[in-house]
Amino acid sequence: MASAAATVVPSSSSSSTKIHHGSEITSIKAFAESNGSCPIPSTYHSLTEPRDDVADHLAASIPVIDFSLLTSNDPQIHATTVQQLANACSQWGFFMLTNHGISEKLMEEVMEKSHEFHNLPLEEKEEFADKGPLTPIRHGTSFHPEAEKVHYWRDYLKVMTLPQFNFPHKPPGYKELGFEYSRKIRGVARKLLKGISESLGLEPESIIKSTGFDSGLQIFAVNLYPPCPEPDLAVGLPPHSDHGLLTLLTQNGIGGLQVKHTGKWVNVNPLPNCLIVNTGDQLEAVSNGRYKSVMHRAVLNNRDTRISLVLVNGPDLDKEIGPELGLLENEDPLFKTMKYRDYFEIQQKTRFAYKSGLDEIRKCL
Ligand SMILES: O=C(O)CCC(=O)C(=O)O
């Protein structure tokens, strides 16, 4: 199908001057609403591997971890669940977490307010325009439009919610809900990290202490993927891994997340009210490669707006992170030790370059 040029300004949009900045589209939501079912700009032809080339028979094998069993006082139940966690992290780097204790009501309310945020007029969101990776609150589109060859069909809000809490002051009530959700997610991530430490044969608090987790980073991302008239050409987010220790994700009931497993893409069909968890680059480094930071991507559809809430939980930005010493008694370190802040910067640059930031700290043995 023929494609429109990126510079086409949609005629039906009352705020068309805001949708574009120079030749760049500054909101894919606003653009999609005005573009209707017309062909998408060729600069959005960002899908490199077919979206339908998925191994659907593997979808039902995505591990499920019951959080209430992991935190059980019964030592046998706890130990069995720690073993399940070990298998999930080593074989998939990805699992669904049920019975996590965060209420469905809170999750729905945060989702609703997140949608309201993205629905604010563009002028209202201008004050949050992205000014760089460690800016506390940033709103933008794609990933880094000025630096990209191709763009991604996504608008985002990214907020640094830890170590200090930041959040947009609108729409009313969003900040309070964001705070509650951020802290609840952090609590779940902390308990998961204890289980993961144990699953590696370490003391439960080992990773929390060595990574400075209690003064660590949390980034709260709200991704919005509008319906795309040509979902076989564009992608919401290309294959990438996450920079932190653990990412906890939920979505608004619309599918699109795919995870790479044994070289194949697998659709993630979440169980009701679960959290989707993936291990990040820092956990791969800390575990000395036992728990791989898994590649995932977001594909699109032509009917529904998809929203995902993605909370990346990382170490203290000023902490030197490397393989846990307790794991190095009988093996060499596979990764160099590096400050998380420095790693984060490298990772942001290499993120979508079809290689992992981990390649930069992998040791050549
Ligand atoms: O929206 C999704 O399902 C994936 C989001 C993601 O991978 C990210 O924000 O890094």
Image (cartoon, helix red, strand yellow):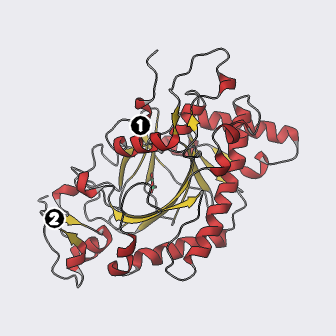
In the image, what residue type sits under mark 1?
Gly
Q: Considering depth in this image, is 13 or 317 the residue closer to the camera?
A: 317
* Rendering coords of residue 274 (x, y %): 62, 57
Residue 109 in sight here = no
- Label 1 sits on residue: 357
Q: For residue 289, which quarter of the picture?
A: top right
Q: Secondary structure at mark 2?
A: loop
* Rendering coords of residue 250 (x, y %): 55, 60
Earlier sequence position, callout 2 versus callout 1: 2
Q: Is residue 176 above or below residue 76?
A: below
Seen from this angle, which residue lies furthest front? Answer: 318
Q: Is the residue marked by circle 1 packed among few (<14), some (14-19), or many (20+) residues within 10 Å? A: many
Quadrant in the picture for the N terminus: bottom left
Q: Quadrant of ligand 1?
A: bottom left
Q: For residue 208, which quarter of the picture?
A: top right
Q: Secondary structure at mark 1?
A: helix
Q: Is residue 132 above or below residue 58?
A: below
